[in-house]
Image (tube, grey):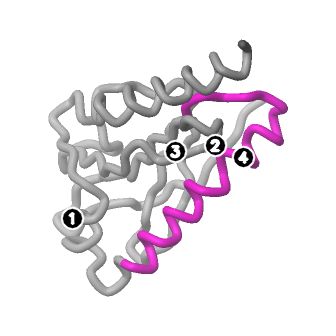
Amino acid sequence: KHILQKYIISRTKSGDPFDCRVRLEKNGRGKWSVAIYLVRIGSNQKVVSNVAQGGSVTTLTAFLEGNFPEEKERLREAIRRIAKTLPYKIEELFDVNFSALGLDIGIDQEANLYLFEVENGPGTEFGEGQIASAKTEYYNYISKKLS
């Protein structure tokens, strides 16, 4: 089976590809919480925003202010709402209890949001402190439940 996805032009004002990464972790109450919001920006010659191939990373707030100033509040709230609700829907759909998820979200030139990917077990190359803190809280929560 294959899944096809419409090509979304998700580029900065200067033409670089980007995506918004929302890193989610379960917290000390067993609920989903955002460990970090960031934006990965690729170089202009690339199709995707691959930081390992010369891209960069910035905060969601700074990125939205610089690239979508008129829509920044609406976009920030929409991304926050996705982060708050989608993880629970994914667990329900797949009947699996995840402990970490990475949501990759694109924004087109008309400021529409698109979910590119949901990753189970996303990397920890950014926000290590926040991720470690959330994981510790969640593991303590699980440990208490098992005791």
Residue denoted by label 1: 62
Kindly identify the residue that appears in the image at 42 percent across and 69 percent down: 76
Outermost residue, top direction? 147
Residue denoted by label 4: 88
Residue denoted by label 2: 31
For the residues labelled 1 and 3, the Cα–Cα distance comes to: 19 Å
Residue denoted by label 3: 103
Is 22 placed above or below 10 here?
above
For the residues labelled 4 and 2, the Cα–Cα distance comes to: 9 Å
Image-based side of 1 in relation to 143, left or right: right
Q: Earlier in the sequence, mark 3 or mark 2?
A: 2
Q: Is residue 68 magenta?
A: no
Tell me the kind of residue under disc 1. Answer: Ala
For the residues labelled 3 and 2, the Cα–Cα distance comes to: 16 Å
Kindly identify the residue that appears in the image at 29 percent across and 46 percent down: 40
Residue in front for this viewpoint, 78 or 106: 78
Q: Quadrant of the N terminus?
A: top right
Regarding mark 3 in the picture, which secondary structure is present there? strand
Kindly identify the residue that appears in the image at 73 percent across and 28 percent down: 97
